[in-house]
Image: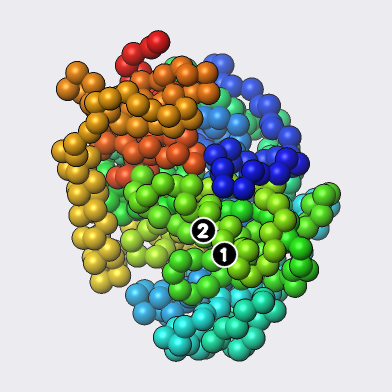
Amino acid sequence: MDNKNISSFTNPKSYWLSSTEETNFPPLREDISVDVAIVGGGMVGITTAFLLKRGGLKVSVLESDHILQGVTAHTTGKLTSQHGLIYGKIKSQHGTEKAKQYAEANESAIKFISNIINEKQINCDFSSQSSFVYTQKDKYIGQINKEVEIASAMGINASYTETIPLPFSIKGAVEFKNQAQFHPLKYLLSLAEDIHGDGCNIFEMTPAVDMEKGTITRVITKNGYKVTAKKIIIASHYPFYDKANLYFSRIYVHRSYILAAKIKENFPGGMYINAEQPVRSLRSIPTEDGELIVFAGDHHKTGQGPNTINHYQNLEKFGNNIYTIESIPYYWSTQDCMPLDNLPHVGNLSENTPNIYIATGFRKWGMTNSTASAIILKDLIVNGSSPWGDVYNPSRFTPMASIKNFIVENFNVAEQFISGKVSRLPDELDVPVGDGKVLEIKGKRVGVYRDENNKLYFVDTTCPHLGCELKWNLAEKSWDCPCHGSRYTYKGEVLEGPTTKPLKRLYYN
Ligand code: FES
């Protein structure tokens, strides 16, 4: 464990990744046929493949990198149906029945994970915890009381409290009992071990770049091989395929930040998040080197806002205000797909694609929503229906719930598109070591990064997805798109979709 030099925050490292081995599944090297092809080896892809294989189907998971390295490896690892003050929102926007389905799906996801851990005897630091949404502002008390009432009516063990065991005073909180926390990668790597073999496969370093729709569907991979399948599931976080543009205007993307710190005081246990902004979320992680405390939050839209290092510093300041931080061995950031109407999209990609399924838009609550998605997808494919299918249905039409957000978010995309094209740029090559800048070189916008050996990397900063101009992210040393959240390394390689194409490299030195 190396301890961070406070105030640098330029070498992020996830505890979940650092405490598990990288997988080494083979790439796809031939054309194959299976029952179900799953694009994306994150929590949805792995859990769905695990369930479908148990259901007797032949499944292939296609992962562009190594499995479980993306959002799944950069979570806080909370297993809770308490997704902020969500039940009041779902009930008012979508009605009581859908709020009930959402509660059942996410409570069932916690039970499912707990049962699998018991059945397979997975050592993944699972522990039962209470989860709290607290507020320090009077104006949220009404919503918190309402949340207790609605969540209780949905069958959740919810109650109101005016105290929580954290070292600051609050105005009120809603507590959900019988929630949990765990090490997500230790759990999912155990599921992955059960998938590969007996006609089922996990293929790594196998990016999917296109699909063929129809009665028989095909995934086309970057290396030219095809997977023919009766069904395809798009589980690539942000959909890698969206030719009808159904999702680009319905999902926007946030980045959030996480510190895992050693503190001088004793942490009381429990999982916490506030109702107000900026978001502050806490839990503990047991490790071989002692307990770490997670301080998370401080989100912003990807590619927008000031220097990304500020977000880590804000969390460090928050941690030090309530405890004494001794060291920060790990810190990392993550990216979340935010649906306009607060509900994930899980089910058929569209009404015209009966053999293609999608799972995306979990907001910041991917652990239970991914698991619920896997159960829904398995039920839709094996049984033809799911008891939670309605609330997650991607073809729902909820104009009142999403129209305001639709206008705001799509105006924001247009604004980013235009401002990126017309902003004035410096033309001097004064890029500090370890930093990146967009410069104007010979009348062209060029992204320049200078590495520790003074080597310069030049990329075209026009996003290959739909043409927005990229912004430099100093904390992660990446080029980020403010429109739909695609991200690239300083060399131009794809880090996160929806893009499937790298940036053009322009000059070399
Ligand atoms: Fe859509 Fe960049 S991700 S334009």
Q: Position of residue 365 (x, y in %)?
A: 53, 60
Q: Quadrant of the C terminus?
A: top left
For mark 2, give the secondary structure: helix
Q: Position of residue 259 (x, y in %)?
A: 61, 53
Q: Find disc 1 in the rendering and name its residue.
A: 318
The residue positioned 66% from the left and 27% from the top of the image is 25
Whether ligand 1 has any atom under 8 Å from the Cβ at mark 1 is answered as no
Residue 130 appears left or right of 150: right
Q: Find disc 2 in the rendering and name its residue.
A: 314
The residue positioned 34% from the left and 13% from the top of the image is 507
Q: Is residue 288 above or below residue 167?
A: above
Marking on residue 78? none
What amino acid is found at the position of numbered circle 1 in the picture?
Phe
Residue 61 appears left or right of 165: left
* Quarter location, residue 442: top left
Whole-Å distance between the Cαs marked 2 and 1?
Answer: 6 Å
For mark 1, give the secondary structure: helix
Q: Position of residue 59 (x, y in %)?
A: 59, 36
The residue positioned 31% from the left and 54% from the top of the image is 250
- Most foreground residue, 347 or 399: 399
What amino acid is found at the position of numbered circle 2 in the picture?
Asn
Residue 244 in view: yes
